[in-house]
Amino acid sequence: MRVFVYEYMTATGTGREPGSPDHAMYLEGRAMRDAVAEDFTLAGLESLVAVGSVGFRDLAKFSQWVLVVAPETNGALAQLVGTVESMKGYHPPVLGPSVAAILLTSDKLALAEHWRTHSVPTPATTDREPTACEAFPVVWKPRDGAGSTDTFLIRDRFELATALAAREPVCPMILQEFLPGQAASVAFLCGPRGHVPLLPCFQLLSDDGRFKYEGGELPIPDDLAERVVKLGRAAVECVPGLLGYVGVDLVLGTASDGSRDYAIEINPRLTTSYIGLRALAAFNIAEAMLKAAKGEDVGTLEWKPGRVRFGPDGSVRVL
């Protein structure tokens, strides 16, 4: 069986040069690509990795599955998955969410509204521009962003002026209430038999008001992990069309019963947490992901003892 792994940043060369605005996302993309391709090979599958954008359709056509890893920004992920879904004649299944699921989860305003109709707690969200009359602090970020690009924590009218001057003018934005707490995430292996949670992680974010992603740590305490899985499951179960590896970002509040926990967004694709998870997995995550997508039983997922911290560049350190 052949799996075609297409990672947008490395295939297009975006952010390749150190110092470029997207360089961190390039390093993340390369780390995810190399890790998942290696795991498919270890599972006895043939993995094809895209080098350059030429031949995307041909490589997809001659594969049994296609795994697309791309940012949601400007519809990149949805467009690539849509290309595979629309191929005439033979088109392989995508090892990931449908275009409809990607469009819903990529639109942070639409997802917030969808979650509210399904009683999933999430911050109040609007698409209006912030003003000096806000009940600060608030978060202002792209409606379809990835990688915390153009994301601002605005604590007063002075920071508002800075954010207004710094943000990308053509980027549709959303405004959210800021909810303090511990940033966390959980990935699910989604398929016809249900959604299987992997180990929840703490997210490490910059403290400069820009929420820059700096990696994560796992495992987390059992009581917090239970809260993360419970809310994460509610967040994905109400979204049809999710398949394969899907990540959920959350904020854990101070209430021990989880009543102040909030879902922030869904990543309808492979995320950097894959790097940390595979360091502790006593099984092949890529193989389990494929089993879940095919509707097969993934079995018992065993984890090695220990604790690790992983970086967005693919580095892993035992704690």
Image (spheres, grey):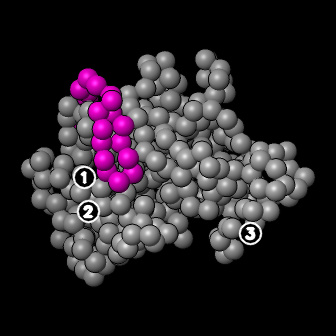
Quarter occupied by the C terminus: top left
> Which amino acid type corresponds to the residue marked 2 in the rendered image?
Val
Q: Is residue 283 left or right of residue 156?
A: left
Considering every residue shown, the one lying at the far right of the view is 133
Using the rendered image of the protein, determine whether residue 304 is visible from the camera's viewpoint: yes
Magenta segment includes 288 = no
* Residue type (three-letter) at the residue carrying disc 1: Val
Q: Is residue 293 magenta?
A: yes
Residue carrying label 2:
5
Q: Quadrant of residue 279?
A: top left
Can you tell which mark lies on residue 36?
1
Q: Residues within 10 Å of mark 2 (few under 14, many from 20)?
A: many
Residue numbers of the magenta segment: 291-319
Question: In the image, 135: left or right of 232?
Answer: right
Q: Main secondary structure of the magenta part?
A: loop
Q: Are marks 1 and 2 in contact (CB under 8 Å)?
A: yes
Q: Earlier in the sequence, mark 1 or mark 3?
A: 1
Q: Secondary structure at mark 3?
A: helix
Residue 237 drawn at (x, y percent): 50, 38
Q: Report x, y in % for residue 313.
A: 35, 54
Residue depicted at x 54% and y 52%:
212
- Disc 3 designates what residue? 165
